[in-house]
Image (tube, helix red, strand yellow):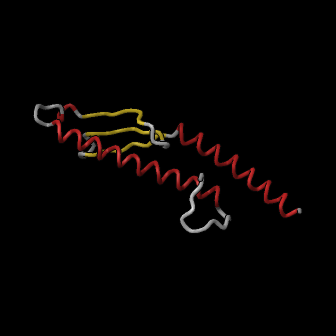
């Protein structure tokens, strides 16, 4: 019975840490770029788009498709950075837990 109580306390503590990390991820920002920095996007670490900055040189007639591609690429760069940040934070919470391979928290 003691083992069950200890396990419940550990689960509750881990849940609190996960909630703290999720709150921190909402406040944290990551920046992605493309075109040698000519397009930059800023996302919250949870993926919410905050800002898009485009170098004025890209605002030329006939450059629409290039600009669209650069925005998509910069967004993908920022999204990957946000994923890595979340993975790093979650590793600190799950350290010492015997989770099955491929299982990620939060569920």
In which quadrant will I find the N terminus? bottom right
Task: Name the foreground residue: 85 vs 13.
Answer: 13
Give the farthest residue toward the left.
Answer: 62
Q: Give the residue at x 82% y 59%.
A: 6
Q: Residue at x 29, y 47 (%)?
A: 73
Where does residue 46 sit, x and y in percent of width and height? 49, 42
Q: Which residue is at a point 14% across and 37% down the rendered structure image?
A: 63
Residue 100 percent coordinates (x, y): 60, 68
- Number of marks in the image? 0
Asked where in the image residue 94 lies, by quadrant, the reply is: bottom right
User: Residue 90 at x, y = what percent?
Assistant: 59, 54
Q: Is residue 96 left or right of residue 65?
A: right
Task: Answer with left or right where residue 54 lies relative to residue 48.
Answer: left
Query: Left or right of 91: which side holds 31?
Result: left
- Residue 78, percent from left and from top: 39, 46
The one nearer the camera, 11 or 20, is 11
Residue at x 59% of width, y 58% of height:
91
Asked whether 35 or 22 is in front, the reply is 22
Q: Is residue 89 above or below residue 42?
A: below
């Amino acid at each position: 019975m003691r083992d069950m109580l200890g396990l419940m306390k550990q689960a509750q503590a881990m849940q609190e840490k996960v909630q703290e990390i999720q709150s921190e991820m909402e406040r944290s920002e990551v920046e992605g770029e493309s075109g040698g920095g000519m397009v930059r996007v800023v996302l919250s670490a949870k993926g919410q788009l905050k800002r898009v900055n485009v170098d004025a040189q890209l605002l030329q007639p006939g450059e629409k498709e290039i600009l669209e591609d650069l925005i998509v690429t910069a967004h993908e760069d920022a999204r990957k950075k946000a994923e890595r940040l979340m993975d790093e934070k979650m590793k600190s919470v799950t350290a010492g837990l015997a989770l099955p391979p491929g299982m990620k928290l939060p569920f």
